[in-house]
Amino acid sequence: MGWLWRDSRGPAWKQGWADQTLASMSAPPWPLVAIFGIIFMLLSLSSYINYRVQMQQNMINFKIFLMFLPVLLIFVAKITWSFKPRTAKHGSADDNTRSFPWSMAALVVVLLALVSYQSRVQSMWSPSL
């Protein structure tokens, strides 16, 4: 029975299996590395081309959205203005102290900003549209 213990306690047994595995590993052959590099490069190129096409479509859609944004803001302001509660008394002193229509003021500010930056916005839109 002593022969079992002697063989298992030799220098190979004292080293861990991870150390043995790492020591026996070698680098893959260069042709295999080159083939995987070429495959990776072609897949990356294909993904990049699809990415560029998708980004161009997204930019065109975003520019169309920005073009219709003032109309959408006017529509939202009109809806919020129509739902504002009004007093039943007309012509009283309470009408003069009503709150300022902040939605209409915000709409005017946005429209003034769009008009002031009109040339820059049009120069961004004209090459794509």
Image: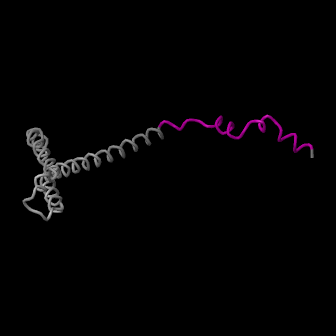
Determine the residue positioned at 84% across, 40% down.
7
Q: Is residue 4 in the magenta section? A: yes
Q: Is residue 12 in the magenta section? A: yes
Q: Which residues are magenta?
A: 2-30
Q: With 21 as the anchor, is 81 left or right in this view?
A: left
Q: With 96 as the anchor, is 44 left or right in this view?
A: right
Q: Residue furthest bottom?
A: 88
Residue nearest the viewer, comparing 120 with 85: 85
x and y percent of residue 103 in the render? 17, 51
Residue nearest the viewer, comparing 66 with 84: 84
| Position of 52 relative to 84 (above/below) | above
x and y percent of residue 75 in the render? 14, 58
x and y percent of residue 50 in the render? 29, 49
Q: Residue furthest right?
A: 1
Q: With 85 as the anchor, is 118 left or right in this view?
A: left
Please name the predominant secondary structure of the magenta segment in the image.
Answer: helix
x and y percent of residue 46 in the render? 32, 47
Residue nearest the viewer, comparing 85 with 103: 85
Residue nearest the viewer, comparing 101 with 61: 101
Determine the residue positioned at 70% across, 41% down.
17
Q: Residue furthest front?
A: 93
Determine the residue positioned at 25% across, 47% down.
55
| Position of 11 relative to 56 (above/below) | above
